[in-house]
Image: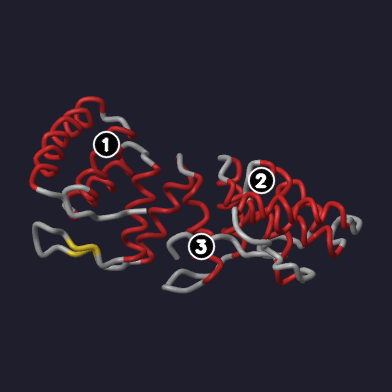
Amino acid sequence: AVVSTQSTGVQKEYYSSLLEEMRDDCLTYRKATECHEYAKLLIEKLGKMKQGFEQYKKNCYEYEAGMSCHNAGNMLLVGGFKDQHSDFTIERDVPAAAELFKRACTTTYGRSCVPIARLLQYGKYNIPKDYNKAFEYLSIGCKKNNNDSCFAKANCYIQGMGVEKDYSKAIPILEDTCSKGHHQSCHNLGVLYYHGHGVDKNMDKFKYYNNQAKIFRGQSNPFQDKPPTPDDMTKPPVGAL
């Protein structure tokens, strides 16, 4: 997430010095990580929204820095970011955000595959609805080992969204992401085993995945001690949407 913080005079002096060092690293090595951190510092510690935003975009298109594409996309998706040193404000522009998410997703940053997929599933903000393309982006994100993308891809199989409904194809995806601590995946597996969707009904596995979801979520029982319904299967996380 992009966060703007107020800094004290001493902090600003420190960050200004650090900024020069990071700028030199970015200009010298022209690497995605160094340039991304440079842009991030401009925005989060010095309030230089305009300069930082432009650096994010430069990183995105010149250095294939997926994280920078993603952060710039989030700024355009939300809008209202004001530069502390000028009258510049980043206005909301969802189609432009979508293009940045697409680039991030298809280059180096699987996390961006979820927001672009969700925008395509919504079909709002002058972005045509396209379930098939959304599924493609989620598949890309899943191949990049992004758990949220895999979870959302599994839900496409469950809901028949952009692909033929097939519970049996969702199950191995959810098993994998659940094993990695993704509580929503564990939750959905529990629902599938409770109702016997794509698998034989199995209350022991329902209880097991229900408990795993509870552990990974770190909160109360996600089913709230009530028998789950198919509607209990959660939708893909929407991030900043």
Q: Which quadrant would residue 134 be assigned to in this image?
A: bottom right
**Disc number lying in front (3 or 1):** 3
The local crowd at label 1, few if under 14, some if 14 to 19, many if 20 or more residues have their Cα within 10 Å, is many
Identity of the residue drawn at 13% across and 58% down:
84
**Residue that numbered label 2 is attached to:** 177
For badge 1, the amino acid type reads Cys
For badge 2, the amino acid type reads Thr
**Residue that numbered label 1 is attached to:** 35
Q: Position of residue 153 (x, y in %)?
A: 65, 54
Name the one closer to the observer, 95 or 187. Answer: 187
Identity of the residue drawn at 18% across and 54% down:
6
**Disc number lying in front (1 or 2):** 2
Q: How far apart are the alpha carbons under marks 2 and 3?
A: 17 Å
Mark 1 or 2, nearer chain start: 1
Q: How far apart are the alpha carbons under marks 1 and 2?
A: 31 Å
Q: Position of residue 88 (x, y in %)?
A: 14, 63
Identity of the residue drawn at 48% across and 47% down:
105
Instruction: Identify the residue at the far right of this view.
Output: 200
